[in-house]
Amino acid sequence: MKHVVALSGGKDSTAMALRLAEAEPRKYEYLITPTGNELPEMFEHWKRLAEMLGKPLTVLTCGKSLQRLIADMRMIPNFRARWCTRILKIEVAEQYLCAVAPAVSYVGLRADEEERQGMYGEIEGIVKRYPLREWGWKLSDVLGYLESRCIAIPTRTDCAWCFFQRIGEWWNLWKDYPGIFKQAEEIEAEVGHTFRTPGKDSWPTRLTDMRLKFEGGSRPRDAGQSDLFSGREGMCRACTL
């Protein structure tokens, strides 16, 4: 019987993985599903977790990065067509679980978010466990545990070009990773679509126009902030769990 831990690298899955190793020591397999569009500090975080857990993480991909899929499909994912999470994360994880069944799958959903469900459907031979809920852990418990283990979760655990991100996060990306921001501009020009939803707010939809505003001194109110735990409306937990 395999014991498989879904480890996005977010606060909840990180706390769950580390505490499981302490409370229920056994041979675990830790799954990560990178899209190839994560920021450098996220890969460093995964590297440190592998060292702390004492074994390499199992990397699952569909064989293509987010950028490659956008080029092949000539389409940028959006809130109506969230194929990025489905193709790059959910489907590859489900396929893996089907291949290793019977197994126990561990998912980091907390006790104070009862409305949330796991991202995988029912899979024959897979028993689901939610250790944080079993322990009664809420957000404060997760944060307290991470602090006790001296773990700092990266500000961004999702894609650099996530269409759900706030204006301040786009500003942070432009300021800290101008090359990655510029690459997103080039993709918009090539594909003919935008990462941002038209009419969502008063800011420009095209990233090139947004960059020009940033360069002209316009700064969103949440620029420079890193409120990791507030979340974003509608965002998929597969990227932040």
Image (cartoon, rainbow, N blue to C red):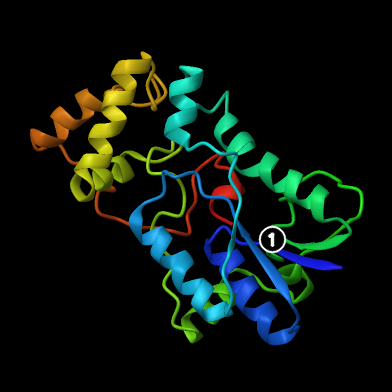
Q: Amino acid at mark 1?
A: Leu
* In this view, 92 is above or below 56: above
The quadrant in which residue 41 appears is: bottom left
Identify residue for label 1.
109
Between residues 236 and 189, which one lies in front from this camera angle?
189
- Image coordinates for residue 208, horizontal then vertical, percent: 21, 25
- Report crowding for label 1: few under 14, some 14 to 19, many 20 or more residues within 10 A (C-alpha): many
Looking at this rendering, what residue extends furthest in the left direction? 216
Which residue is at a point 50% across and 26% down the rendered structure image? 78
For the point 45% across and 77% down, which residue is it? 151
| Residue occupying the point 67% across, 86% down | 22
Tell me the quadrant of the picture where the C terminus can be found: bottom right
**Is residue 1 among the parts visible in the rendering?**
yes
In the image, residue 144 above or below residue 208:
below
> At numbered mark 1, what does the secondary structure look like: helix, strand or loop?
loop
**Residue 76 in sight here:** no
On screen, residue 187 versus residue 122, left or right, reads left
| Quadrant housing the N terminus | bottom right
Return the x and y of residue 215 as percentages of the image width and height: 10, 35
Exactly how many numbered labels are in the figure? Answer: 1
Residue 138: which quarter of the image?
Answer: bottom right
Image spot of residue 218 (x, y percent):
14, 36
Q: Tell me: 39 left or right of 70.
A: left
49 displayed left or right of 40: right
Residue 156 to residue 108: above or below: above
Viewer-nearest residue: 166 or 202 = 166
Q: Left or right of 205: which side holds 118?
A: right
Task: Using the image, determine if residue 165 lies above or below residue 2.
Answer: above
